[in-house]
Image (cartoon, rainbow, N blue to C red):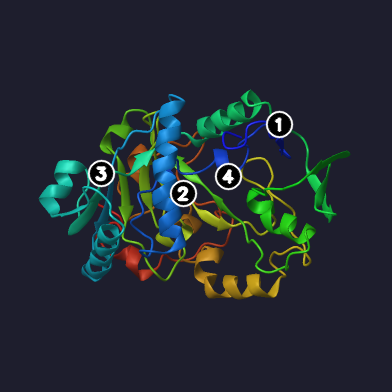
């Protein structure tokens, strides 16, 4: 709208409010670009997007503190992967990136220990709900319209004009921009695009530390990513309200949160999308192949929460996690109990840090 004064813009939002799903339910981290292959589209979008986001936040008085991130190696076999991340970060031009020894770890995060860590001081945090609201205000302030409770049910093009059907309303325009999260593949097929790839949704879950315990964590503490899994692993993160939470996929034996296969397409915040054989989901062959590959993770077999007890590898879990009715346990606590994996019987440090 800034580039094309006078353009008419209409935003269709299927929920009653903006940022009701992923935009308002994420880690709140402004990633610096450590993880991505130099020169890749992911690296370019992350680095460029970070710069633009910070400028946007400054324009709208949205806090985005650079609290820094420690990626902590606690096992010898993680050191090579940590070195590779350092090389990637340098190639991506990250400022202030450095390796720290155990003493350096304690200087940055006094409650954490490890063999070595990669410190990224430029990593920051932000409340993305506030960012979404500011974007909405720019749209309406520029003469645009936002229609909530308008779920798109049809997209058709004729003579270079798009016709969008949404909740009984028909809107026509020269261009359509789809930014639909979990619904993106469904909207793409409405335009005649191929049915592949399809989105398999995952739900994130979090445990928040009790009031007062957040002081144990100054910034962000992450493990060295395991390339065997598509998740970053158990990590501790602060938000702009100075609260700290533990976040993780089930493969890392956290009591929560978890990145869980959203088989039903419902649950978590509000509702995502129902899944059927025609739209993608458990019965879609490619989805089934993925779940077979991550069977121990998806089934909770490697998840100590199935024993309805705190994770033994993280001392913080038994003392500072808050739960109104019960002790920390995983979301699959109703499953049949299984003995913990051998690694959990060992007194070795946590996969992310000893706190």
Between 265 and 344, the one lying in front of the other is 265
Dot 2, crowdedness within 10 Å: few (<14), some or many (≥20)?
many
Between 151 and 337, the one lying in front of the other is 151
Between 63 and 140, the one lying in front of the other is 140
Q: Position of residue 20 (x, y in %)?
A: 63, 37
Q: Position of residue 22 (x, y in %)?
A: 58, 44
> Which of pointers 2 and 4 indicates the residue nearer the eye?
4
Q: Secondary structure at mark 3?
A: loop
Q: Position of residue 92 (x, y in %)?
A: 31, 58
Judged left or right of residue 156, residue 335 is: left
Alpha carbons under labels 2 and 3: distance apart: 26 Å
Alpha carbons under labels 4 and 1: distance apart: 18 Å
From this view, report whether residue 50 is shown above or below residue 90: above
Dot 1, crowdedness within 10 Å: few (<14), some or many (≥20)?
some
Q: Is residue 338 visible?
A: yes
Q: Secondary structure at mark 1?
A: strand
> Which of pointers 2 and 3 indicates the residue nearer the eye?
3
Residue 17: numbered disc: none
The quarter of the image holding the N terminus is: top right
Q: Are marks 3 and 4 in contact (CB under 8 Å)?
A: no
Alpha carbons under labels 1 and 3: distance apart: 37 Å
Judged left or right of residue 61, residue 14 is: right
Question: On the image, numbered disc 3 is attached to which residue?
Answer: 121
> Which of pointers 4 and 1 indicates the residue nearer the eye?
1
Q: Are marks 1 and 3 in contact (CB under 8 Å)?
A: no
- Along the polypeptide, which appears first: circle 3 or circle 4? 4
Question: On the image, numbered disc 4 is attached to which residue?
Answer: 22
Residue 256: numbered disc: 2
> Which of pointers 1 and 3 indicates the residue nearer the eye?
1
- Along the polypeptide, which appears first: circle 2 or circle 1? 1
Question: On the image, numbered disc 1 is attached to which residue?
Answer: 146
């Amino acid at each position: 709208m800034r580039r094309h004064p006078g353009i008419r813009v209409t935003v269709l939002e299927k929920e009653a409010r903006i940022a009701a799903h992923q935009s308002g339910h994420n880690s709140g981290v402004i990633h610096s670009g450590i993880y991505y292959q130099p020169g890749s589209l992911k690296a370019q979008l992350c680095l460029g997007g970070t710069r633009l986001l910070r400028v946007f936040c400054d324009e709208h008085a949205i806090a985005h503190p650079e609290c820094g991130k420690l990626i902590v190696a606690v096992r010898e076999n993680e050191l090579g992967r940590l070195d590779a991340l350092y090389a990637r970060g340098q190639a991506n031009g990250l400022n202030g990136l450095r390796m720290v020894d155990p003493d350096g770890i304690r200087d940055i995060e006094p409650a954490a220990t490890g063999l070595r860590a990669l410190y990224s001081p430029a990593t920051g945090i932000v409340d993305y709900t506030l960012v979404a609201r500011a974007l909405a205000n720019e749209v309406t302030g520029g003469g645009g319209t936002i229609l909530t409770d308008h779920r798109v049910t049809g997209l058709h093009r004729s003579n270079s004009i798009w016709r969008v059907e949404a909740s009984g309303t028909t809107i026509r325009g020269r261009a359509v921009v789809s930014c639909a999260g979990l619904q993106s593949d469904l909207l793409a097929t409405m335009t005649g695009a191929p049915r592949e790839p399809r989105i398999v949704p995952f739900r994130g879950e979090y445990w928040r530390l009790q009031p007062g315990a957040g002081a144990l964590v100054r910034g962000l503490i992450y493990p060295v990513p395991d390339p065997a899994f598509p998740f970053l692993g158990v990590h501790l993160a602060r938000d702009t309200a100075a609260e700290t939470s533990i976040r993780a996929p089930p493969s890392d034996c956290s009591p929560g949160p978890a990145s869980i296969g959203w088989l039903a397409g419902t649950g978590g915040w509000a509702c995502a999308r129902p899944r059927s054989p025609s739209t993608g989901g458990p019965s879609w062959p490619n989805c089934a192949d993925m779940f077979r590959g991550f069977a121990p993770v998806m089934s909770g077999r490697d998840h100590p929460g199935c024993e309805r007890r705190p994770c033994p590898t993280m001392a913080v879990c038994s003392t500072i996690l808050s739960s109104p009715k019960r002790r920390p346990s995983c979301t699959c606590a109703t499953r049949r109990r299984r003995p913990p994996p051998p690694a959990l019987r060992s007194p070795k440090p946590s996969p992310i840090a000893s706190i």
